[in-house]
Image (spheres, rainbow, N blue to C red):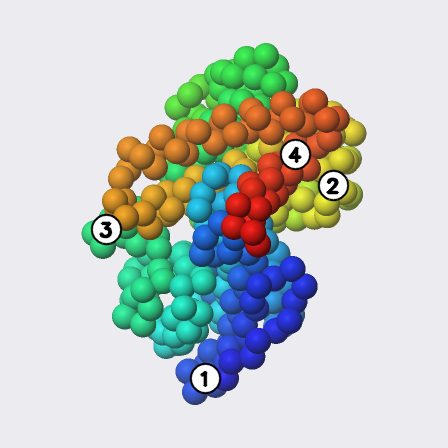
């Protein structure tokens, strides 16, 4: 195993690891551990180039710092990636190699599932490191985090509807969901059950067909979904979909979805505000899955009722952020980052860091 420490401004540690014998090449980024160990998912993806994988883990690790801080969790932000197709036969060896890298970090980073890595994979990694969370219920973990992510987004949508329309009711409102994967499908089901009208899209035809059949929702072409006329647009798939190019064409009053890093650039938060579109900061409202995993890591062990209670509290955090944005004339994104920075700053001051 060849380990290379990369110097990256603003990050506590960034590691490049390679083991050609096992077909393994991966990165781990630890952004900030002021509040606690860095927690973030491990994704396995066939990136075109190394720099794409590195950019991904850096971007997502920083977002995890803000997510944990805004949620009031004693955790920092981290992320890991393996450059490989999760569907080929080398997955077990690559996961074992990444587990060894994580163990080498001595608890500074705790991994969890992400694209290409599931709860069963995490169970296998425990043979090589204890720094794993998001385990199946059968292993004492919190299981699939997607229902909790969907719950947090749903409760946040209600806050946004009340802010914009003066009524938090889902019934009678129209929702456009980009991405009908685990979280998107869960969210669509909850919205339909609450009386909402839902239109969805997914790049995978089988996911779109499953959503139409199971939920009875309308399906549109993936290229159209961002520009559907709706009350709430929910990006639940790719990041960077809200951009200088896409924002002028949006036909929604609210953007509130589960995808990470929805803003292509920081300036895009202001672009949404200038158009009169309320943007619910993604790292605030999609923290339900992280909160569920955080409960698992506590000494008392996993408690579903406690996880649900904390996830529903995301709504109160969002209310505070929207109030701060109104009072200061800034964007909800900037207000949310300020809240996270304050919480980190308070701990640093208390610990004389």
Which mark is first along the chain, 1 or 4?
A: 1
Between marks 2 and 1 in the image, the one whose residue lies nearer the viewer: 1
Q: Nearer the viewer, residue 232 or 291?
A: 291
Could you tell me if residue 52 is visible in this image?
A: no
* Residue at image mark 4: 335
* Residue beneath disc 1: 1
Where is residue 118? Give x, y as percent: 36, 57
Disc 1 crowd, CA 10 A, few/some/many (<14, 14-19, 20+):
some
Q: State the mark number for residue 101.
A: none
What whole-number distance in Å separates the C-alpha atoms at marks 3 and 1? 31 Å
The quadrant where residue 160 appears? top right
Q: Earlier in the sequence, mark 2 or mark 1?
A: 1
Residue identified by numbered label 3: 140
The residue identified by callout 2 is 268
Residue 320 or residue 344, whichever sits in front? 344
Q: Earlier in the sequence, mark 3 or mark 4?
A: 3
């Amino acid at each position: 195993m060849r380990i290379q420490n990369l110097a990256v401004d603003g990050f506590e540690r960034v590691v490049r690891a390679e083991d050609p014998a096992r077909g393994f090449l991966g990165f781990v980024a630890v952004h900030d551990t002021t509040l606690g160990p860095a927690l973030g998912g491990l994704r396995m993806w066939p990136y075109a180039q190394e720099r794409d994988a590195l950019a991904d883990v850096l971007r997502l690790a920083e977002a995890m710092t803000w997510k944990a801080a805004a949620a009031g969790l004693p955790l920092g932000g981290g992320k890991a990636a393996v450059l490989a197709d999760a569907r080929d036969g080398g997955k077990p060896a690559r996961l074992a190699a990444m587990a060894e890298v994580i163990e080498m970090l001595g608890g500074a980073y705790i991994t969890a599932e992400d694209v290409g890595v599931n709860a069963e994979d995490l169970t296998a990694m425990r043979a090589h490191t204890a720094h794993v969370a998001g385990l199946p219920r059968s292993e004492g973990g919190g299981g699939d985090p997607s229902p909790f992510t969907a719950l947090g987004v749903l409760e946040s949508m209600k806050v946004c509807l009340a802010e914009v329309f003066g009524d938090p009711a889902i019934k009678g409102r129209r929702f456009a969901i980009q991405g009908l994967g685990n979280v998107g499908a869960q969210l669509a089901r909850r919205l339909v059950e609450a009386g909402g009208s839902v239109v969805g899209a997914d790049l995978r035809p089988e996911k779109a067909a499953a959503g139409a059949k199971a939920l009875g929702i309308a399906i549109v072409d993936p290229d159209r979904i961002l520009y559907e006329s709706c009350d709430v647009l929910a990006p639940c798939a790719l990041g960077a979909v809200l951009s200088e190019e896409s924002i002028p064409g949006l036909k929604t009053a609210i953007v509130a979805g589960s995808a990470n890093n929805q803003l292509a650039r920081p300036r895009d938060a202001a672009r949404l505000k200038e158009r009169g579109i309320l943007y619910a900061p993604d790292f605030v409202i999609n923290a339900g899955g992280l909160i569920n995993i955080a409960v698992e890591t506590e000494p008392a062990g996993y408690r579903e009722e406690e996880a649900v209670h904390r996830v529903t509290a995301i709504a109160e955090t969002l209310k505070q952020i929207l109030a701060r944005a109104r009072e200061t004339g800034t964007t909800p994104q900037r207000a949310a980052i300020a809240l996270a920075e304050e919480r980190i700053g308070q701990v640093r001051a208390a610990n004389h860091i």
